């Protein structure tokens, strides 16, 4: 039967809890659809720091495991325990960002879907979203102010200054815009490019390149929004959006907003992709929830596992080509929600809801596979 190799990096906080459940779902689709995965389980983030006496959040074995795999299934990293370490070895800056950079994962796809049966969990006025909504955020992931240099702090004129650099090359903007236009072609053919071209030089270039690339996709209706206005429009009329494309930091912020208006950060998966694998339509990629390690609820068995489980579905589709298994997972998640199963983050107290913890939610999903 078909065998694939994946690296499994659960990380910290709720990461290991939701990863355990995501792997139960993977087991189920493997037996149902007749394929298997060899799983190389490795430490990352705070878990790796703890195991290496604070030497590194990204051990060489972990990188090697990823290099020898078809895809990476990632949990979340970080937490209060490690936030006073030197910035360069903290879980986020020392493991997560280097992994994205090392594998050239420049395209971060974050689907913001509010299922019609979950509109009551959205803070958006329900009469505005009678059918829920379905927005895809395409976030540039390896450029911009996250990685630009110079970056640092120093003494100037008797006080401390600190600085970051927001920088984009034309080629970096061009390639992410093409990902977004291609995604729009497969959906509603509407693309909103988000920038701050009234202030930032990098945004002026961004808008220029977006307009140029648009000529290659005449069927897609392109519009531009300033990021402040985009944040406002997203919570006002989320269902007016189809695909949204933006630079790294704006995408980080807007995707959390999108997650919340969908019901909960615990619902939204993400795929971080580079180029296609040689001679294939599949991508090497890293798949993780859009949210973090949620230290406030870690260890209690109450985290919503859906973001991690839907990340498995994205991995199956984009990196392994197991599309039937991916579809089955997405259908089973919707079915569990339709049946009323709710973890705390999406529960509203309605009589029709069945309030459950992490593993019961997963049981409900498994029942649909
Ligand atoms: P967070 O995303 O971890 O949590 C924000 C809020 O959302 C919390 O109230 C949390 O309980 C809730 N939430 C998130 N996921 C949930 C789930 N699956 N089920 C139910 N509720 C959920 O953001 P934060 O608190 O700002 O960050 C905590 C740590 O996570 C920090 O160290 C941060 O750097 C890190 N972080 C890591 C990643 C990643 O690894 N990809 C992403 C974001 C934040
Ligand atoms: C995310 C996270 C990361 C980011 C952090 C943890 C570095 O917030 O994946 O959205 O800012 O990209
Ligand atoms: Mn974020």
Image (cartoon, rainbow, N blue to C red):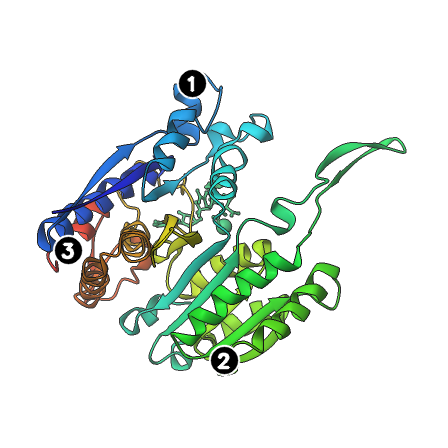
Circle on res. 52: 1
Q: Which of the two labelled residues, at mark 1 and mark 2, occupies the earlier sequence position?
A: 1
Secondary structure of the residue carrying tag 1 is: loop
Q: In which image quadrant can residue 119 be found?
A: bottom left
In the rendering, at what x and y percent does residue 198 appear? 74, 68
Residue 124 makes an appearance in the image: no
Quadrant in which the C terminus is drawn: bottom left
Report x, y in % for residue 165. 71, 47
Mark identifier at residue 364: 3
Q: Which residue is mark 2?
A: 220
Judging from the image, what secondary structure is the residue with disc 2 in?
loop
Q: Would residue 352 be found to the left or right of residue 156 on screen? A: left
Discs 1/2, front: 2
Say which label, 3 or 1, has the lower sequence index.
1
What distance separates the C-alpha of mark 3 from that of mark 1? 38 Å
Q: From where the camera sits, is residue 279 visible?
A: yes
- Structural crowding at the residue carrying mark 1, measured as other residues with C-alpha within 10 Å and reported as few (<14), some (14–19) or many (≥20): some
Residue 66 vertical position relative to residue 117 in the rendered view, above or below: above
The residue at 48%/62% (across/down) is 138
């Amino acid at each position: 039967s078909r065998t694939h190799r994946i690296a499994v990096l659960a990380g910290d906080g709720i990461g290991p809890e939701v990863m355990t459940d995501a792997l139960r779902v993977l087991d189920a689709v493997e037996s149902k659809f007749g394929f298997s995965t060899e799983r190389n389980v490795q430490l990352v983030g705070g878990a790796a720091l703890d195991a290496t006496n604070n030497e590194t959040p990204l051990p060489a074995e972990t990188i090697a495991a990823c290099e020898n795999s078809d895809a990476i299934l990632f949990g979340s990293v970080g937490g209060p325990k490690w936030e006073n370490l030197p910035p360069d070895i903290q879980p986020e800056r020392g493991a997560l960002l280097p992994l994205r950079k090392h594998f050239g994962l420049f395209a971060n796809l974050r689907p913001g879907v509010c299922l019609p049966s979950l509109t009551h969990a959205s803070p958006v006025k329900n009469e505005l979203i009678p059918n829920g909504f379905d927005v895809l955020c395409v976030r540039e992931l390896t450029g911009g102010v996250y990685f630009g240099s110079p970056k640092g702090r120093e003494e100037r004129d008797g006080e401390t200054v600190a600085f970051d650099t927001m920088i984009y090359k034309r080629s970096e903007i061009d390639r992410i815009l093409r990902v977004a236009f291609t995604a729009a072609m497969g959906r509603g053919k509407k693309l909103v490019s988000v920038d701050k071209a009234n202030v930032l030089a990098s945004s002026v270039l961004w808008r220029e390149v977006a307009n140029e690339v648009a000529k290659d996709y005449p069927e897609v209706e392109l519009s531009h929004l300033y990021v402040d206005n985009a944040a406002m429009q997203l919570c006002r009329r989320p269902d007016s959006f189809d695909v949204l494309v933006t630079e790294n930091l704006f995408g980080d912020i807007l995707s959390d907003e999108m997650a919340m208006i969908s019901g909960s950060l615990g619902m939204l998966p993400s795929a971080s992709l580079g180029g296609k694998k040689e001679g294939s339509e599949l991508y090497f990629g890293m798949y993780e929830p859009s949210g973090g390690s949620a230290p406030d609820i870690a260890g209690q068995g109450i985290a919503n596992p859906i973001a991690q489980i839907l990340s498995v579905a994205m991995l199956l589709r984009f990196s392994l080509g197991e599309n039937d298994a991916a579809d089955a997972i997405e259908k089973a998640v919707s079915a569990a929600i339709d049946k009323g199963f709710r973890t705390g983050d999406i529960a509203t107290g309605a009589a029709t809801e069945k309030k459950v913890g992490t593993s019961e939610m997963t049981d409900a999903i498994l029942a649909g596979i």
